[in-house]
Amino acid sequence: MTPDWMRDASLFELFTLEAEAQTQVLSAGLLALERNPTQADQLEACMRAAHSLKGAARIVGVDAGVSVSHVMEDCLVSAQEGRLSLKPEHIDALLMGTDLLMRIATPGASDVGPSDVNGYVALMNDLLTPLVTATPLGEPLSADEMLLANAQLLLGAVSPAPARPPEYYAPLPVEPLPAFLMSELEPESAPLPDTEADPEPAVKNNLARGEQRPVQGSERVLRVTAERLNSLLDLSSKSLVETQRLKPYLSAMQRVKRSQSGASRALDSLEALLDANVDPDAQKALEEARRLLSEAQHLLIQQTADLDEFGWQAGQRAQLLYDTALACRMRPFADVLVGQARMVRDLGRSLGKQVRLEIDGEKTQVDRDVLEKLEAPLTHLLRNAVDHGIEFPEQRLALGKSAEGLIQLKASHQAGLLVVELIDDGGGVDLDKLRTSIVARKLSPAETAAQLSEEELLSFLFLPGFSMRDKVTEVSGRGVGLDAVLHMVRQLRGGVELEQRAGEGSHFHIEVPLTLSVVRSLVVEVGGEAYAFPLAHIERMRDVQADEIVQLEGRQHFWHEERHVGLVAASQLLNRPQSQSAEEVLKVVVIRERDAVYGVAVERFIGERTLVVLPLDPRLGKVQDISAGALLDDGSAVLIIDVEDMLRSVEKLLNTGRVERIDRRNRQMDATPRKRVLVVDDSLTVRELERKLLLSRGYEVGVAVDGMDGWNALRAEDFDLLITDIDMPRMDGIELVTLLRRDSRLQSLPVMVVSYKDREEDRRRGLDAGADYYLAKASFHDDALLDAVVELIGDAQG
């Protein structure tokens, strides 16, 4: 909305703005009065809001608004004067009037007819006098009939006779001007004038002043379009980057200064070498060279100092400009809460529950775009909490709780992130019922489900389409839609965690960036180019030694926090050339998406940077694995990784079996290739013992956890020897050797069987299958294994 729009706006459009502000005051105040009907400050605030709306409606000629706000004001004044004790039915009716006023003030939202207004006025009049208690024939009405009768009045289904004399509805005296039409800007606490006045001069004066509205602290608020703010932020971010480009020039001047110092020393040395009888012309030329060099040094020192000062000042101002532009996009967290407390209250009452919403951190500043995207997931979580978190009053009382359920919504800044916590004191998640639902939906076998931890069980709630309900409700479902919540939060580069306490409630923990305009990232090098991983998706960065990489089911893994983590080259994912480095250490970024954890091997860690996000040209469409661009301090471009997209690319590579091997040991140029041995054993202890023995002797070693895993590894890679156990799941050692001997490529591969079975028939069975050597674990020792390996394939580099 621009000043030009304000000057050309109709009175009704201005009335709409006034209604939006005053109905928010009414909603918040009425919810507070429901808990404590005698709060004088809330009664005063609500009365003033209704009073202002009545005056505004009269000025713009909206009679329906005048009638509704007038009867609401009567109710609130009666409460102020102690003639009326506000009860839930009064609060219900006043909230209905608030909604009705907003409908009246919103053009095209819905038609509000005379019957709606008359019905509402009649309902309020009945609440201010004894409720309808009898039929026209004098027979008492039941409680349900009384409720129905009043509801019909509200909806205009009945044309009621006015409970007050006709003159009550006569034209009202002119009311004081509302706040938005006052000719002079006043503090919000200024008393309403009592004099009547012609509104037109005030309206014209106010519109002529342009777009100015009084706020606390006597500050003016100007409305600016989002496009202009975005443009300002973009320009300020680019100016911030441009100032960083001064640093290379300053560094170059420092190098020139050092070079000049070296030249000066060289002249000193030259002069010392020349004897006193040097030619006068040569001496004069030497002194002239020294003078010119001295002048150049002095000028360079001065210019370097000036450039350094200018660079510092420009950097400070550019940073201030950017911070100020960014602050213009920041809004209080309360902006996303408009109507949420009312929604919680109304939903609770419709379900027969007593629910209260407590909010902490309303003034926490967050980017406008983040707030807009948070509204939907927060609304869903709040509805879930009311519908399925909070118990019915009688259930709560039986459990020793208060009849009123409590939902807490907290917002705070932590380590550059917005942390939102939603906590209810309801019944929590029924883990036994959840486990049963998991098995019933065939998401896990019963035996596995029985062993799942609480954290693992709760993660199923975030799966698409998962629900613990037999029927779908219109309200919510604990689980239904949580996948959408997670997806929306992930789009904000954030995360969601759920904790629960049986019988005590649930706790949702949401972390998102404070702004989408900047992102804290780890910048790495891949194929000679810079890429950035947002820190929100990085579990850690680490070095992986070449001998830590193992082969499992044809895939490369390394051991990380007591689990095998799949390893993929970033160069393959991003279609960049592989690094030719022969270093034994891999630089690995460990990324996580819920339970999916993978290691992405990069060439170099450049460092942690705060990057200003520059959206890609929309004509490019969705670029695989890339979310946006940015500029580094030196002005060079960097692409920001879309980690969710990259995780899907990793899964696709693994499923298609096209993962490239990462093994820098094969790139050593000064060493002959080492022989490779595949160890297949389902015992981790035996597997690791054999692997370490072979590594100590210089062999390269791959491992597999069973026969099937070993068969996949043999088909994917080249080995010089197979060492296998016999008794293993999925495929035993005999089956593995039999398959190998039938394969034209592998049939000549030497095979050693190492087994606990030491009977002659077992030995014969293994050798008949095609094994070249049989070693019993009972007589197993280090030298026996290594001697057998040397006997079969020779030394590691022989």
Image (spheres, grey):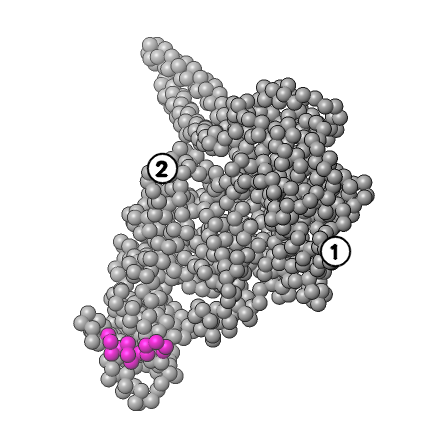
Amino acid of disc 2:
Asp
* Residue 733 lies in the magenta-colored region: yes
The answer to whether any part of residue 45 appears in the image is: no
The image quadrant of residue 288 is: top left
Q: Residue furthest right?
A: 82
Q: Is residue 681 left or right of residue 123?
A: left
Label 1: how many residues lie within 10 Å, few (<14), some (14-19) or many (20+)?
few
> Image check: 300 left or right of 174?
left
Residue 416 position within the rendered picture, expressed as x and y whole percent measured from the top left: 55, 43
* Residue on which disc 2 sits: 617
Instruction: Kindly identify the residue that appears in the image at 78 percent across and 45 percent down.
Output: 84
Give the answer, above or below, for where 778 lies relative to 421: below
Of residues 26 and 723, the one drawn nearer to the viewer in this rendering: 26
The residue that label 1 is drawn on is 138
The C terminus is located in which quarter? bottom left
On the image, the x and y values in percent for residue 355 come to: 66, 55
Q: Residue at x 43, y 70 (%)?
A: 442
Image coords of residue 342 (percent x, y): 63, 48
What is the magenta range? 728-740
> Going 46% across and 44% down the picture, which residue do you hit?
521
Q: Is residue 653 magenta?
A: no
Q: Residue at x 57, y 43 (%)?
A: 336
Task: Kindly report which numbered mark, 2 or 1, lies closer to the viewer in this rendering.
Answer: 1
Of the numbered discs 2 and 1, the one sitting upstream in the chain is: 1
Q: Identity of the amino acid at label 1?
A: Gly
Q: Main secondary structure of the magenta part?
A: helix
Rendered location of residue 632, percent (x, y): 42, 36
Judged from the image, the secondary structure of the residue bearing numbered disc 2 is: loop
Q: Is residue 275 visible?
A: yes
